[in-house]
Image (spheres, rainbow, N blue to C red):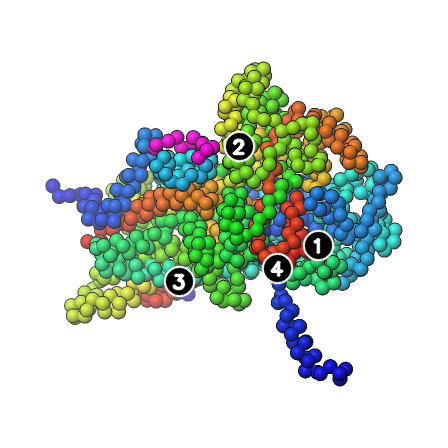
């Protein structure tokens, strides 16, 4: 049986080493997050007054932080917060952005005009400012940071979805479905949505990368994950005060963010190539 | 003049000119950008650092918090202590050339009291009127004796601006302040720099050895220190405690560690709102005592401040002459804490500790959480952005709150607004009629020995209720160029520019 | 072309109004009483009352919006409550700083992103492709504040080559200015390099498989000429115009970069203003930047059409 479009895309993805590497690292981090309680050598919130800001050693592979907690364990547990921040934020963006974008693209007319103007207004404000204002409004916590990032990033998906819907709307199969008399909602869900999934997937993967950085940025400003729960961003926030005498506090969370975000970026780029029908 | 060869005179002239020092600039790194540079409106600590170079005041304080003359050369209380007569220094002029005299003092005090948005009103509240006795004598009339008055006049309430400039600029004065200090205002670029240049007619010009002062706000302590290290700055204030060990070990820079006149503490809602009744901590003073006994203050200082603080249990530090020796700092005592909790009928009390999102406040919360757990407390931490927390404190919408106070030279400045009934900073909601009467008495008694006795009584009463558990008194950490001499370590944390010079 | 311009301008106005309402609404939603925050340590009730009246805080939201918009239309963006400077003055003072930072960052981004994109497209599937990818992606994979702190530690504290922070006007001392700006510009430019690399790469890939390129190859021209003379010129057009649109990203990135490097530009101004609830400053600055962003969008679209006659309709 000839391979379907998804199998062909997977094969194309497999042939790109950078994308595969990205995928492997992402999966490794997911494993780390899920099995954190078993993998982490120590309790991430257990303080130890005698081991304050100790350099990496046999006992503390990544050193300790300003109140004696093991950095390695905190980095491992922090994977949960960062992955969650990335995935949940983008899910919120998708849940808000895709339906609105579809409405704009599909219904057209004044609905489209209003939605487009509002989206333009959101996109004209610097993303981080919106996120900061929202996070400050909701109160500093990881959940609120995710909501703030999700809402601030939704307009990107509105615009993307709308564009995709506009170009797919004029395809033959959609015209045919309409001619047969299908109700608009059915057309939207059964015919249009599956055909715009590919670019949405790509954008979502790239957005997860950006969301992880955004969470780190908000935590850096004191608006994200609050103590004592570990998150890479809040670890960086604390570490910046001790960069000179305890650099390991900043290096390991920073490297982790870098690896995770880079991997999502590589994966996203790979997906774009694999899913683009014009690439050979 | 022909006996001395002209060429010789010329040579001497050139040599003298060449030997004259090049323009000396002192570059100071601040921890924040100051707010409005108008002594009447100013409301930040960091603004006072700039005022130290820009605006002289009637009186000043020395290293022992004693009152010393500046624009006023002497003072005299009337027998009923309701009038303060100040003799003013002669020959002082403002930066715009106007004379400093009793009329100017009257103008300034009235400006502090009446200008819209003035932050000095509370400080000068008991002053009812000002009389010009003669051009160099002025008299302040009070509604009742007020011992903290002299200390108020050593800060912004005693700063004198040029009446002519103030009237001309109106509420735009802050953009072009005209005072009578050693340096005059040149320019200000917000969040970038404040530039002052030497005022040629300063009355104490022999003590000034710099031509220019540049204040640069650099909020990040690590970056601030990096700037000093790389030679771009000559002096920084509020260095990070964790950096001090390395700086001292390197021996390349000079440091000053001055115990502050403020404090760091935990404010507990004991009566501000219904939340006070919601937890055993707010309801029962025994539970609060148990919390205090569960804390190891020295350990706290070590972990949170890298030992750059001294432990304390009152609104003034143990090294301060006003400290009440009848209420010493208690040692950690877990058994007693547990016993108290049992007595109060709650073995595992829980409460929420609100903390600002600054790094050291969060560390305090974490350490308190860990220490208190050993006595049975279940402390939940809630980090709140500063702006939101002010609102919350005001409404009493908290159970416990990590809060610091920058401190005032007179102990009344650390006491009255916090423990007198219904005062704006009394977030704890503590209100006791007898304590109130004692505090009022302490403000009206001028004799230090008598005042101290009253304070001892107030301390004992307040300590029993513990609306605030005082933790420690931080040290002002200054780091500066080793060539800079004449740095005076005055506990208010402000750098005086008189006497400073580069060797 | 003309009616395209008119249509776009007509869209600009309502969008701007929406931006103003969005940022105004967002500010006013922020919890905390701004009068209390600005009232200073002593929290004198008289001062709080005075500030509330001055900022019209007791009036309903639409009235406050009207006060603000009324001022804006007359050219008065309000005053920074914190240090009483007119917002317009602050904007004029800080705009050149952020503009210089943005320009330098964009230059670095172009210098990194475009060659990386070309290599990645031309050497597709090989280790060069991967290397170029990582090199360019490194920029958006690193939180720029972290990179900034590491660079400060390395170049300023340890090596002493560059200043740790601060800004010197280029008119005062160009050398010192460039030394102070190079690190933040690099940190910012890195992030945009990735976006440019992606665009360049996909544009090049499209172009490389196009007919005229095949013709050039068939003619026997060497690969280098094909790439540089024929493909690149066509690929670069959309890339450069898209680059202009990255202003939004630049401003977002500038927010934290300026904080870390203490550059007195817009970014730092806005963050401080949000935390201090200095409404007028946030509203004024966002309005100005949003307008600039939309005008730049418009210019980019016009340039795109001007260069690509096939798209005119």
Residue found at the very far front of the displayed protein: B3
Residue B92 as seen in the image, left or right of residue B15: right
Residue named by callout 3 = C107
Q: Main secondary structure of the magenta part?
A: loop
Q: Are marks 3 and 4 on the same chain?
A: no
Q: Secondary structure at mark 2?
A: helix
**Residue visible at 28% across and 39% down?**
A27
Give, as a single range, the part of the protein colored magenta. A40-51
Residue named by callout 2 = B299
**Residue visible at 44% across and 39% down?**
A53
Discs 3/4, front? 4
Query: Image quadrant for the C terminus of chain C?
Result: bottom left
| Residue B324 % position (x, y) | 70, 31
Q: CA distance from mark 1 to mark 3?
A: 46 Å
Query: Image quadrant for the N terminus of chain C?
Result: bottom left
Discs 4/1, front? 4
Q: CA distance from mark 1 to mark 2?
A: 41 Å
Residue B123 as seen in the image, left or right of residue B304: right
């Amino acid at each position: 049986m000839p391979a379907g479009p998804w199998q062909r895309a997977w094969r194309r993805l497999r042939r790109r080493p950078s994308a595969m590497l990205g995928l492997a690292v992402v999966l490794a981090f997911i494993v780390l997050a899920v099995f954190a309680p078993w993998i982490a050598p120590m309790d991430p919130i257990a303080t130890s007054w005698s081991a304050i800001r100790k350099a990496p050693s046999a006992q503390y592979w990544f050193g300790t932080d300003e109140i004696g907690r093991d950095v390695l364990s905190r980095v491992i547990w922090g994977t949960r917060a960062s992955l969650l921040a990335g995935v949940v934020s983008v899910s919120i963006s998708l849940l808000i952005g895709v339906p609105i974008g579809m409405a704009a693209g599909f219904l057209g007319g004044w609905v489209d005009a209003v939605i487009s103007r509002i989206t333009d207004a959101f996109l004209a404000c610097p993303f981080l400012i919106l996120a900061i204002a929202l996070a400050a409004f909701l109160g500093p916590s990881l959940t609120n940071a995710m909501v703030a990032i999700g809402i601030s990033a939704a307009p990107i998906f509105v615009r993307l979805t709308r564009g995709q819907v506009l170009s797919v709307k004029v395809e033959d199969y959609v015209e045919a479905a309409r001619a047969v008399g299908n109700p608009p909602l059915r057309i939207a869900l059964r015919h249009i949505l599956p055909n715009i999934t590919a670019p949405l997937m790509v954008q979502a993967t790239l957005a997860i990368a950006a969301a992880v950085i955004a969470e780190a940025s908000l935590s850096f400003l004191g608006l994200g994950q609050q103590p004592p729960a570990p998150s890479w961003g809040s670890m960086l926030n604390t570490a910046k005060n001790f960069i000179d005498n305890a650099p390991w506090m900043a290096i390991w969370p920073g490297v982790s963010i870098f690896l995770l975000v880079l991997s999502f970026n590589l994966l996203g780029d790979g997906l774009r190539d694999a899913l683009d029908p014009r690439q050979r | 003049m022909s006996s001395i060869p002209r060429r010789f005179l010329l040579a001497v002239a050139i040599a003298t000119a060449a030997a004259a020092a090049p323009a000396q600039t002192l570059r100071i790194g601040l921890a924040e950008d100051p707010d409005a540079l108008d002594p009447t409106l100013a409301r930040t600590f960091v603004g006072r650092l700039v005022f130290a170079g820009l605006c002289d005041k009637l009186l000043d304080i020395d290293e022992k918090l004693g009152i010393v003359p500046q624009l006023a050369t002497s003072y005299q209380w009337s027998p009923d202590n309701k009038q303060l007569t100040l003799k003013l220094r002669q020959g002082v002029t403002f930066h715009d050339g106007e004379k400093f005299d009793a009329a100017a003092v009257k103008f300034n005090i009235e400006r502090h009291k009446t200008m819209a948005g003035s932050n000095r009103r509370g400080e000068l509240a008991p002053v009812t009127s000002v009389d010009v006795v003669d051009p160099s004598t002025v008299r302040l009339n009070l509604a009742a004796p007020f011992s903290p008055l002299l200390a108020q006049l050593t800060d912004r309430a005693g700063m004198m601006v040029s009446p002519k400039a103030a009237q001309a600029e109106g509420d735009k004065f802050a953009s072009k302040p005209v005072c009578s200090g050693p340096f005059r205002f040149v320019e200000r670029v917000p969040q970038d720099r404040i530039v002052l240049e030497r005022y040629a007619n300063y009355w104490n010009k022999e003590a000034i050895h710099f031509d220019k002062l540049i204040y640069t706000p650099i909020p990040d302590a690590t970056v601030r220190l990096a700037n000093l290290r790389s030679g771009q700055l000559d002096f920084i204030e509020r260095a990070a405690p964790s950096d001090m060990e390395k700086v001292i070990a390197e021996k390349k820079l000079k440091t000053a560690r001055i115990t502050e006149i403020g404090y760091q503490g935990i404010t507990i809602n004991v009566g501000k709102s219904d939340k006070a009744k919601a937890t055993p901590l707010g309801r029962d003073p025994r539970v609060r005592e148990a919390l205090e006994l569960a804390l190891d203050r020295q350990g706290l200082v070590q972990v949170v401040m890298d030992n750059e603080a001294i432990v304390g249990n009152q609104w003034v530090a143990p090294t301060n002459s006003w400290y009440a020796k009848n209420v010493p700092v208690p040692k950690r005592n877990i058994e007693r804490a547990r016993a108290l909790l049992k007595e109060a009928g709650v073995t595992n009390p829980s409460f929420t500790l609100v903390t600002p999102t600054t790094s050291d406040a969060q560390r305090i919360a974490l350490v308190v959480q860990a220490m208190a757990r050993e006595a049975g407390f279940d402390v939940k931490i809630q980090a709140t952005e500063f702006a939101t927390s002010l609102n919350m404190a005001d409404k009493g919408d908290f159970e416990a709150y990590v809060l610091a106070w920058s401190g005032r030279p007179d102990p009344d400045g650390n006491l009255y607004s916090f423990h007198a009934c219904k005062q704006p900073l009394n977030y704890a909601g503590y209100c006791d009629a007898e304590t109130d009467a004692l505090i009022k008495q302490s403000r009206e008694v001028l004799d230090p020995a008598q005042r101290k006795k009253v304070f001892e009584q107030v301390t004992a009463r307040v300590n029993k209720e513990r609306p605030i558990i005082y933790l420690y008194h931080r040290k002002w950490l200054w780091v500066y160029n080793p060539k800079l001499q004449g740095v005076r370590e005055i506990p208010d944390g402000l750098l005086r520019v008189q006497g400073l010079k580069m060797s | 072309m003309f009616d395209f311009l008119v249509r776009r301008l007509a869209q600009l106005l309502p969008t701007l109004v929406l931006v103003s309402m969005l940022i105004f609404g967002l500010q006013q939603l922020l919890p905390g009483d701004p009068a209390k925050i600005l009232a200073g340590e002593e929290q004198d009730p008289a001062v709080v009352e005075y500030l509330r009246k001055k900022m019209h805080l007791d009036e309903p939201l639409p009235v406050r919006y009207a006060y603000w918009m009324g001022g804006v239309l007359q050219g008065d963006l309000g005053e920074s409550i914190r240090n009483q400077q007119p917002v317009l003055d602050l904007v004029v003072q800080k705009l050149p700083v952020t503009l210089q930072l943005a320009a330098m960052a964009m230059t670095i981004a172009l210098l990194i992103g475009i060659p990386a994109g070309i290599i990645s497209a031309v050497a597709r599937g090989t280790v060069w492709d991967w290397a170029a990818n990582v090199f360019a992606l490194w920029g958006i994979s690193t939180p720029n504040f972290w990179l900034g702190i590491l660079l400060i530690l390395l170049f300023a504290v340890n090596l002493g080559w560059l200043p740790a922070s601060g800004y010197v006007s280029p008119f005062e001392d160009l050398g010192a200015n460039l030394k102070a700006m190079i690190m933040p510009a690099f940190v910012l430019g890195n992030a945009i390099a990735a976006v440019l690399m992606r665009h360049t790469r996909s544009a090049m890939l499209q172009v490389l498989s196009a007919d005229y390129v095949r013709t050039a190859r068939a003619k026997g021209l060497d690969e280098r000429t094909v790439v540089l003379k024929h493909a690149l010129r066509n690929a670069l057009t959309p890339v450069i115009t898209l680059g202009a649109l990255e202003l939004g990203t630049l401003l977002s990135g500038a927010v934290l970069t300026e904080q870390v490097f203490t550059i007195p530009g817009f970014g730092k101004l806005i963050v401080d203003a949000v935390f201090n609830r200095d409404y007028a400053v946030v509203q004024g600055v966002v309005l100005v930047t949003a307008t600039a962003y939309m005008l730049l969008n418009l210019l980019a679209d016009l340039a795109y059409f001007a260069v690509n006659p096939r798209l005119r309709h």
